[in-house]
Amino acid sequence: MNFFKKKYRYAKTAFKQGQAVLSDPPLLSISFGSHLCDHCGCMNPTTSFPAVDCHADYCSDKCRKRAFTQYYAFMASPDGEGMSEKYALLRSQYASAGTADAPLIQSFHVLAALRICAITEQCKKRGELDPNQCTFDMPAFRCLLRPGDLGEETLSMSGFRVPFNEQYRAYEKVRETLPSSLRKQVNGYDLGWYDNIWGLLMMNCVNGGGVQSTGEVTSVCLMRAGSFINHSTNNHNAVLLPQRDHNQNLGFVAVRDIAAGEEVTITYVDPSIPSAEKIRLLATQYFIHEGRSVTDKDAHKSKFEDKKKKLLQKIKSEKSKIITTESEEKEKAKINIPDIVEIEASAEGTIIDADHTLEAELRLEQLRLQEELESLGNEHDALKKEVVARGL
Ligand SMILES: [Zn+2]
């Protein structure tokens, strides 16, 4: 998740063991069992709160409202072309297909992608997103780490390559379920978008609390602020509670006293599983290389930082000599425009109301812009070479 600690959470004040350190409304959760709330993924008590078109069931009126505001209004609208019903059908197919053919943990990506598509469309409808913008222009999603953010070196260390085109079959399911108007959309929901969603989910999701008797996870949650909490193998100071807190949020609790200023950490893997399995899970799912010695990791990091520094210096020195072309001007304009647009929560549970992540978002946006500048520098170099090669 937070490789090289680009992002982290720290305690502003001291916490005593057992105290709640963070209450985090899930960005979204996907649950399979009918006994689980369709929005927050918690165990559904006996009273049920059905959705407007009865294709979903919630634990409370609060969850029903949040779901409707964030994505369900689109899914159940004529524009959604029966998306809420198709979604419910797909989910029940996955749930009944059994774990051998369709492990729920994999089917979950398809369902989450559909929901994220609906979140994006609903944001556009509210005017919080331009029609030509995409999911990753939304602050709530932009601030979450994706595999592409880690850089090629880190990814190759993990044996991963972007794009994850092997996910093609899953993407086909998403395409089939999308309203026809969205399938053709430019800058929309193509394989590249799905790749990014898949990676983002892989790196930021947690077990939502539901586990079958077979050990299969039945509920998965995508966190907001909680995604910024780093992993610690031997010295974590907080844990994620298996059940939602009184606000239907994900709750993090201190497992020992935490000093003010100390970084809050959890463990991403079950501490009781064999250490080889732990190492494998951390490396493949979170890009954390526990097997490597600290020295290896530090060496890798400093090599990476060196490269970055050199590149930035090069761009600085080249900046004065820049031959400005029309397309470059356009690219530059793109970079300069997006000051963080903080969107006020217009209704309870609006997807972009996570103002407690703003600080981290800003920091991350800064990093992202820096990286964008770097890549522009590379493009600029290539352009210059081409100019020289053509003798212009
Ligand atoms: Zn709920």
Image (spheres, grey):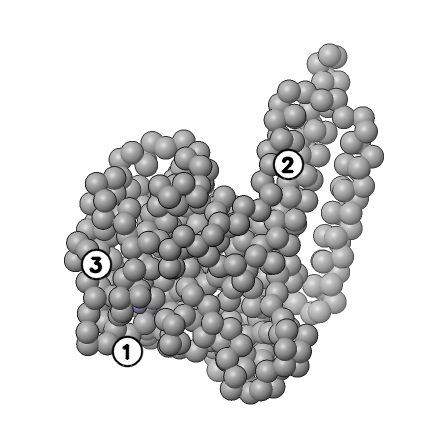
The crowding category of the residue bearing disc 1, from other C-alpha atoms within 10 Å (few below 14, some 14 to 19, many at least 20), is few
Frontmost residue, 49 versus 101 = 49
Mark whose residue sits in front, 2 or 1: 2
Q: Residue furthest left?
A: 54
* Cα separation between marks 2 and 1: 53 Å
On the image, numbered disc 2 is attached to which residue? 336
The image position of residue 349, as x and y in percent, is 38, 59
User: Dividing the image into four equal quarters, which quarter contains ligand 1?
Assistant: bottom left
Residue 224 image position (x, y, % from top left)? 48, 61
Identify which amino acid the numbered label 2 is placed on: Asn
> Relative to the observer, which residue lies in front, 222 or 127?
127
In the rendered structure, find residue 51 and report the number of the disc placed on it. 3
User: In the rendered picture of this protein, how many numbered marks are placed on residues?
Assistant: 3
Q: CA distance from mark 3 to mark 1?
A: 28 Å
Please indicate, yes or no, whether residue 98 appears anywhere in the rendered image. Answer: no
| Element class at badge 2 | helix
Judge whether residue 231 can be spotted in this image: yes
Q: Is residue 352 left or right of residue 7?
A: left
Looking at the image, tell me whether mark 3 or mark 1 is earlier in sequence order.
3
Q: Is residue 306 above or below residue 295?
A: above
The residue under label 1 is which amino acid type? Answer: Ser
Q: Who's the residue at 57% across and 71% down the image?
A: 231
Residue found at x 35% / y 41%: 125
| Residue placed most toward the observer, 258 or 107 | 258
Residue 213, disc: 1
**The furthest residue to the top:** 392
- Disc 3 marks which amino acid? Ala
Secondary structure at numbered mark 3:
loop
